[in-house]
Image (cartoon, helix red, strand yellow):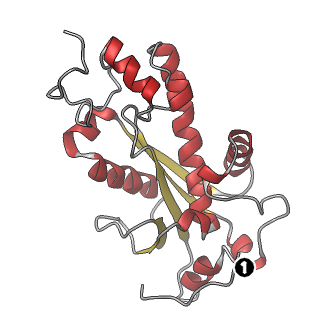
Amino acid sequence: MGPMARPPVQDRFFHERSVFATGVRVLAGVDEAGRGPLAGPVVAAAVVLPRSWVLEGMPTGWEGLNDSKQLSPPLRERFFEGLTTGSGVHFSIASVEADVIDAIDILQATHRAMNAALAGLGDDLEHALVDGRPVRSLRCPQTALVKGDSLSYSIAAASVLAKVTRDRVMREAESKWPGYGFATHKGYPTPEHLEAVGRLGPCPIHRLSFAPLRRADPGLFPP
């Protein structure tokens, strides 16, 4: 789609309504979590909010839905439960694991996860609002919005589902591979995580193609 007018402040359904005005009936927001960590999957979510919400306004209690990074963990969990249980929201979540990330690179893996999430919504999907830059390989027409998770409720909802899902995966990883602190840092390259990898070596969910995990990097891995 071509350029759109600037939305009024705090109108986070502006872009959804603009797409609907072109004749589109089914619209999803899509976002990902986990591009930057050294371990674990990249997770994408796609969300179709009820059309009545877009046209009539967010129901009471949902106005705080925002970019998942701007929400506290308890609030993210509350929105996750609300979005996934009995609210009339249609959603799909997909992930790509570390070994595939190493094989095809993180950008392609992210796009693969996004397309898988969109595919899970079925054939009626006509358009997607994407957080960030355009995705050339996306399976449907799109509108890319920089910082879209703070501009669009649909993208914000996808952001929450992707973030909470990935955080849960990494908490489970803590019990399978103790000592790395996955439950705390979720696989991001914190000093504590790097120290643990230097002490223990990588585990099966580490992305070995990521610096500084490449085995060519001296001094990180024990002999």
Quadrant of the rendering where the C terminus is positioned: top left
Up-down: is 137 above or below 94?
below
User: At 74% across and 50% down in the image, what residue appears?
Assistant: 86
Tell me what residue is drawn at x 66 percent, y 59 percent. Answer: 66
Q: Tell me the residue at 20%/30% (across/down).
A: 214
Q: Is residue 3 left or right of residue 16?
A: left
Location of the N terminus (image quadrant): bottom left
Q: Horizontal and vertical percent for residue 45? A: 51, 52
Residue 71 percent coordinates (x, y): 68, 49
| Residue 6 visible in the displayed image | yes
For residue 98, above or below residue 9: above
- Residue 23's quadrant in the figure? bottom right
Q: Is residue 121 visible?
A: no
Q: Nearer the viewer, residue 140 or 15?
A: 15
Query: What residue is at 26 percent from the left and 29 percent from the top?
Result: 213
Q: Where's residue 128, x and y in %?
A: 47, 69
Name the outermost residue toward the top.
Answer: 223
* Residue 43, horizontal then vertical, whole percent: 45, 44
Label 1 residue SS: helix
What residue type is disc 1 on? Leu
Q: Quadrant of residue 102?
A: top left
Q: Looking at the image, which is closer to me, 137 or 181?
A: 181
Q: Left or right: where does residue 74 sit relative to residue 167?
A: right
Classify 130 as above or below 121: below
The crowding category of the residue bearing disc 1, from other C-alpha atoms within 10 Å (few below 14, some 14 to 19, many at least 20), is: few
Name the residue tied to disc 1.
55
**Horizontal arrangement in the rendering, residue 106 relative to residue 36 (left or right):** left
Q: How many marks?
A: 1
Residue furthest to the left in view is 216
Of all residues shown, which one is farthest toward the right? 60
